[in-house]
Image: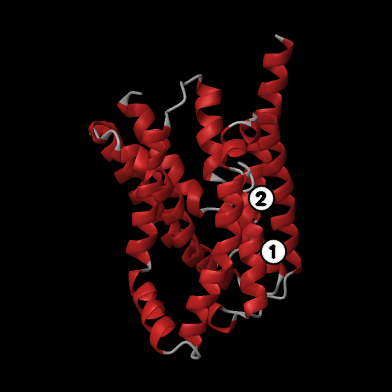
Amino acid sequence: MDMVQTVVLGFVQGLGEFLPISSSAHLVLVPWLMNWAYFGLTFDIALHFGTLIAVVIYFWKDWLKLLHHGFTKPREREGKLFWYLVLATIPGALIGFMLEDAAETIFRQPVLIAGMLMVLGALLYAADRRGKKQIDVENISLRTSFLIGLSQALAIIPGVSRSGVTMTTALALGMTREGAARFSFLLSAPIILGAALVKVPELAANPSVIDAGFLTGMLVACASGLAAIGFLLRYVQTRTFLPFVMYRFAVGALVLGVSFYRWAA
């Protein structure tokens, strides 16, 4: 894989992980559309580490406070939020572990991904329009946290989008746009960490693969991820998710069109 592909895919991962457009979908679709070879497990690890570093850098103060209160003041607001995040992580982690093979094979079909992009786009639009937008992160309940975490399990299917489905569920359950985005980002840290750690033994068995491409992809994913987090948290303070909905439908339609053309050719 050349350096241009490395930079493009790192950029795609960083934006797609935190904007509600599905990073896993784009990491399948971009090489498919461009006729690039599969980038391999090693580079996938690099991209996950990049986005993990991004979310940790952005929310490090929040996580220090949550960890401290979680173990010293579990009945206070920040302490409860820490344990709510732990609970919300469990469904996604279990489903991801059980369906990892399917995620690497069956779920990577472009037509399925296109369908998921559009279906979840429609759900995001409905939740954004109809949600009451009254609940902030500080006031989230155990039930709401668990349901958001449960929905995160669907992100094993490319096109669903981990951030997209968790924000959609949060909005449907009455959270504000900013609250939905912030909770989704906080929830992303443990699930991305888990996804990266599962693959570390394979990386440790062959450390020589940590080359310039690995580091470049990781750094680009980190930088674009930081930009995406900051942008979205500012954006949702005054605007709706409609542009992301429109983008999902546009990409879905493009993929269906290309798929039909290649099938008919």
Eyeballing the image, is 87 above or below 28?
below
Q: Mark 1: which amino acid?
A: Asp
**Residue 21 visible in the shown view:** no
Question: Circle 1 — which element?
Answer: helix
Eyeballing the image, is 173 above or below 35?
below
Eyeballing the image, is 195 above or below 24?
below
Horizontal and vertical percent position of residue 227: 39, 55
To which residue does mark 1 refer? 128
254, 53: nearer the viewer = 53
The residue positioned 67% from the left and 68% from the top of the image is: 147
Tag 2 and tag 1, C-beta contact below 8 Å: yes
Horizontal and vertical percent position of residue 45: 38, 41
To which residue does mark 2 refer? 245
Question: Circle 2 — which element?
Answer: helix
Classed neighbour count for the residue bearing mark 2: other residues with Cα under 10 Å, few (<14), some (14–19), many (≥20): many
Q: Mark 2: which amino acid?
A: Val
Snapshot quadrant of residue 110: top right
Quarter of the image containing the N terminus? top left
Q: Is residue 43 left or right of residue 99?
A: left
215, 247: nearer the viewer = 215
